[in-house]
């Protein structure tokens, strides 16, 4: 398929998804309006705040969006907060909708992050994060390599030895192609001496689908964010082989890749972006909302519950960080053969 054909196909998917979203929002009575309105001494937003999760339910972006919804509601910072799922193409369908159909809409935030940076490249997306209005980096979490409870692989070494013997025979489930899960699988293969082109990575549009493959025994292993996996690990349904932090996470009996002799660490950061074309006042209002959410006891409890690391960053420093990540991710994806 040529680049022109891919872009045409991508545009058609965006149009179809946009039509579905228009019908949905019409039924919900969601409008763009003139921006979130503040009222009362508490400064709560009286308008509807919509958080787009550009993935299917169950994944990291969906989880982030719904935890934001809970924090904003429970803290009283916003009276009405709703989450919309727009899955497809590693989040770039939702990204395209934000950029092409919501320009100037100050009521809409999109939960996104590192995965989107890679998905833009692997899906040859005509729109990028640079087309949005960056609001704030919120958090980071580590990735975990897991196997089903009945798996014969008890340790990372067991899995790597079997993987080396026949890389294509061991399917690894994860999120979208080019995302953090995929990057970690490729980096792990490269680090242990496996030809990355032989890795049998099975992408899914959301964490829920990936977990279903794992729990159903359809794949040999899986890679997802810690927030998506930890409850299944603690319940004994999945076995954790390694976590991608430089050090162990307190309270979790999960060894790192590094301590098991594999020089590999990776943190998956998440952020929120707004539509292009909003005013500086509207952007400042959204930044203020995120700052107050971050300072709330409700958000701090959510970070602790999910073992997420506070990585709050905004303003010009956040914009510079995004530019640096675009360069870094492109280099990683090229090194493991995911993009040219």
Image: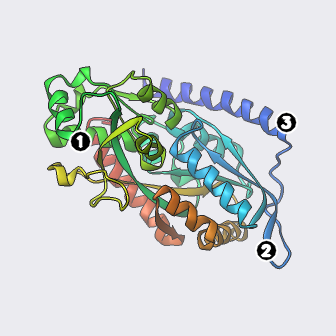
Find out whether the residues at labels 3 and 2 contact each other: C-beta distance under 8 Å.
no
Q: Earlier in the sequence, mark 3 or mark 2?
A: 3
Element on which disc 1 rests? helix
* Residue 184 visible in the displayed image: yes
Relative placement, left or right, of 78 versus 60 is right
Q: Residue at x 62, y 32 (%)?
A: 14
Element on which disc 3 rests? helix
Q: Residue at x 40, y 42 (%)?
A: 233
Q: Residues within 10 Å of mark 3 (few under 14, many from 20)?
A: few
Q: Residue at x 50, y 63 (%)?
A: 304
Q: Residue at x 61, y 51 (%)?
A: 65
Question: Residue 27: which numbered mark, if any?
Answer: 3
Question: Residue 188: which numbered mark, if any?
Answer: 1
Element on which disc 2 rests? loop
Look at the image and name its color scheme.
rainbow
Residue 133: image x %, image y %? 60, 59
Question: Residue 43: which numbered mark, if any?
Answer: 2
Q: Which is more toward the observer, 113 or 337?
A: 113
């Amino acid at each position: 398929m040529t680049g022109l054909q891919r872009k045409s196909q991508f545009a058609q998917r965006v149009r179809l998804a946009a039509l579905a979203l228009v019908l949905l929002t019409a039924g919900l009575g969601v409008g763009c309006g003139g921006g979130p309105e503040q009222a009362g001494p508490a400064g709560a937003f009286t308008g509807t705040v919509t958080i787009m999760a550009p993935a299917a339910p169950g994944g990291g972006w969906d989880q982030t969006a719904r935890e934001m919804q809970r924090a904003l509601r429970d803290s009283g910072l916003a009276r009405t907060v709703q989450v919309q799922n727009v899955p497809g193409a590693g989040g770039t369908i939702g990204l395209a909708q934000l950029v092409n159909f919501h320009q100037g809409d100050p009521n809409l935030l999109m939960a996104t992050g590192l995965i989107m940076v890679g998905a833009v490249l692997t899906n040859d997306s005509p729109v990028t994060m640079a087309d949005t209005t960056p609001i704030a980096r919120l958090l980071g979490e580590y990735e975990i390599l897991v196997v089903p409870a009945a798996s014969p692989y008890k340790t990372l070494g067991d899995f790597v030895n079997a993987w080396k013997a026949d890389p294509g025979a061991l399917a690894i489930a994860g999120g979208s192609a080019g995302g953090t899960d995929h990057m970690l699988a490729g980096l792990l293969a490269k680090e242990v001496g496996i030809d990355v082109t032989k890795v049998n990575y099975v992408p899914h549009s959301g964490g829920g689908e990936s977990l279903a493959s794992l729990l159903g025994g359809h794949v040999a292993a899986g890679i997802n964010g810690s927030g998506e996996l930890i409850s299944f690990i603690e319940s004994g349904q999945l076995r954790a082989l390694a976590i991608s932090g430089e050090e162990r996470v307190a309270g979790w009996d999960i060894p790192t890749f590094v301590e098991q002799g594999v020089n590999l660490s990776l943190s998956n950061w998440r952020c929120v972006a707004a539509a292009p074309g909003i005013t500086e006042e509207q952007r400042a209002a959204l930044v203020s909302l995120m700052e107050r959410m971050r300072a709330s006891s409700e958000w701090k409890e959510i970070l602790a519950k999910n073992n997420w690391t506070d990585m709050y960053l905004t303003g010009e420093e956040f914009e510079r960080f995004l530019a640096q990540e675009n360069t870094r991710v492109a280099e990683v994806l090229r090194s493991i053969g995911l993009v040219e």
